[in-house]
């Protein structure tokens, strides 16, 4: 069987037409974790006027040389200060307060001695000290948060400062997830047959896609029955944007999924990619819907979901990228086990500002070892042309924590 190269498969995936225009308005308090569907632009300067950045006395800097100034009173935060400070005068001004007209410097409380309506300057400060200038934070018209950004605490804080009551966010794509195979037992199911195995794929992938910003339809498990699988897939495509199945895509007698997908009226984009794990992956498209049929081994299905499912979700959300890829230096020699592009679970650490990769406690074996992805692991990419990589070689690594 001829396999498409990994690079070609990713290019084809990137070129697929995907609707990323769907959006909705939600309240700011409900927007955490959602993806912005519009740029957030500043409608005013921050601050809009010179502002005190600590408690002290607002003065003309040139007056500090006199050594003593009259205090006109207090200027608390939120006060619409209208007094004009003349030479020899000051106003006690608090953090966040508008600087009074005529002043250009704030001398902190610790630098003066107050007595009977006057302050004595004990230690001078530079001109403009502790004064936030107009537009220090941002200027009117600045793009503060770009479309496609995942909203976190900082984004919410900035938008609250802009009085952004409602936020335009991308509609979550709906991903239906199902694990196929008569050997699969769903959670809570009992069987006296020791040959059956507990399903983890549908739960692993549901969590993965939810983490990436999708809404998941959990379909559980399905036995190796063509009629049952066909009906389940058809129902899923009626309500989901992406159908993701695991199992049934290889070349065995009971691998029905690869034959069912075309019968659904879906056009196969490609079947078989030169990657390890997961080379029997199948990607198909029916109208604006996608079918992603993946291998059944847990590690294999997780990796291929990251490589092929997350880019689809990311495109539908209008995100720039589904995950971050960084260059890292190998701490150990690495020997590739196949002629394909390999994705190997690894440990990644930052030392002296540089990423390093090692494989400590990572087990070498089949594509079933999902535990290799525990403990903040990452995925190291070794290309088709790679065979033996010496310690110190730079490699590309997918940071799973950025999903």
Image (spheres, rainbow, N blue to C red):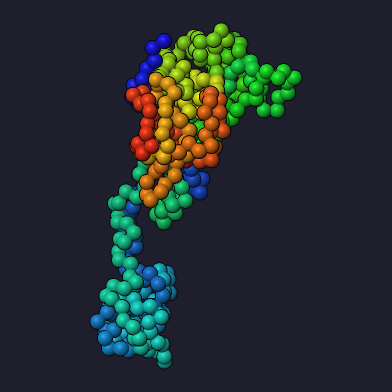
Picture layout, residue 139 above or below residue 291? below
- In the displayed structure, does residue 195 sit left or right of residue 37? right
Farthest residue to the left: give it: 62
* Number of numbered discs on residues: 0
Residue 193: x %, y % from top left: 72, 18
Residue 84 visible in the displayed image: no
The quarter of the picture where residue 79 lies is bottom left
Q: Residue at x 32, y 89 (%)?
A: 68
Residue 251: x %, y % from top left: 51, 10
Q: Residue at x 59, y 30 (%)?
A: 203
Residue 118 visible in the displayed image: yes
The quarter of the picture where residue 187 lies is top right
Residue 122: x %, y % from top left: 35, 86
Residue 33: x %, y % from top left: 48, 43
Q: Residue at x 31, y 81 (%)?
A: 124
Instruction: Tell me the quadrant of the picture where the N terminus can be found.
Output: top left
Picture layout, residue 293 above or below residue 362? above
Q: Nearer the viewer, residue 124 or 297?
A: 297
- In the displayed structure, does residue 121 sit left or right of residue 402? left
């Amino acid at each position: 069987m001829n396999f498409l190269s990994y690079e070609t498969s990713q290019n084809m995936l990137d070129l697929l037409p995907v609707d990323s225009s769907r959006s909705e308005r939600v309240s700011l308090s409900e927007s955490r974790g959602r993806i912005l569907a519009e740029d957030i632009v500043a409608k005013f300067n921050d601050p809009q006027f010179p502002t005190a950045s600590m408690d002290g006395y607002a003065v003309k800097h040139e007056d500090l040389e006199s050594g003593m100034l009259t205090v006109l009173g207090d200027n608390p935060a939120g006060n619409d200060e209208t007094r004009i400070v003349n030479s020899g005068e000051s106003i006690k001004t608090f953090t966040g307060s508008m600087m009074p007209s005529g002043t250009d410097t704030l001398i902190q409380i610790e630098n003066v001695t107050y007595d009977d309506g006057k302050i004595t300057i004990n230690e001078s400060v530079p001109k403009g000290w502790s004064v936030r200038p107009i537009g220090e934070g941002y200027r009117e018209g600045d793009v503060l948060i770009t479309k496609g950004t995942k909203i976190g605490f900082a984004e919410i804080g900035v938008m609250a400062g802009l009085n952004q009551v409602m936020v335009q966010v991308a509609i979550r794509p709906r991903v239906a997830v199902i694990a196929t195979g008569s050997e699969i037992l769903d959670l809570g199911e009992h069987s006296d047959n020791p040959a059956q195995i507990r399903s983890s794929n549908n739960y692993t992938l549901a969590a993965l896609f939810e983490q990436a910003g999708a809404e998941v339809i959990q379909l559980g498990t399905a036995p190796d029955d063509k009629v049952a699988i066909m009906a389940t897939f058809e129902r899923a495509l009626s309500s989901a944007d992406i159908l993701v199945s695991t199992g049934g895509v290889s070349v065995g007698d009971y691998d029905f999924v690869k034959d069912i997908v075309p019968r659904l009226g879906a056009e196969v984009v490609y079947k078989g990619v030169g990657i390890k794990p997961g080379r029997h992956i199948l990607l198909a498209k029916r109208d604006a819907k996608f079918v992603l049929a993946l291998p059944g081994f847990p590690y294999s299905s997780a990796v291929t979901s990251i490589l092929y499912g997350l880019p689809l979700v990311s495109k539908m959300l209008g995100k720039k990228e589904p995950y971050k890829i960084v260059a890292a230096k190998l701490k150990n020699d690495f020997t590739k086990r196949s002629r394909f592009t390999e994705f190997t679970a690894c440990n990644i650490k930052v030392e002296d500002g540089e990423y390093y990769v090692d494989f400590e406690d990572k087990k070498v074996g089949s594509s079933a070892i999902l535990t290799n992805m525990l403990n903040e692991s990452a995925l190291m990419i070794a290309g088709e042309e790679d065979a033996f990589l010496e310690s110190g070689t730079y490699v590309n690594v997918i940071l799973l924590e950025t999903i």
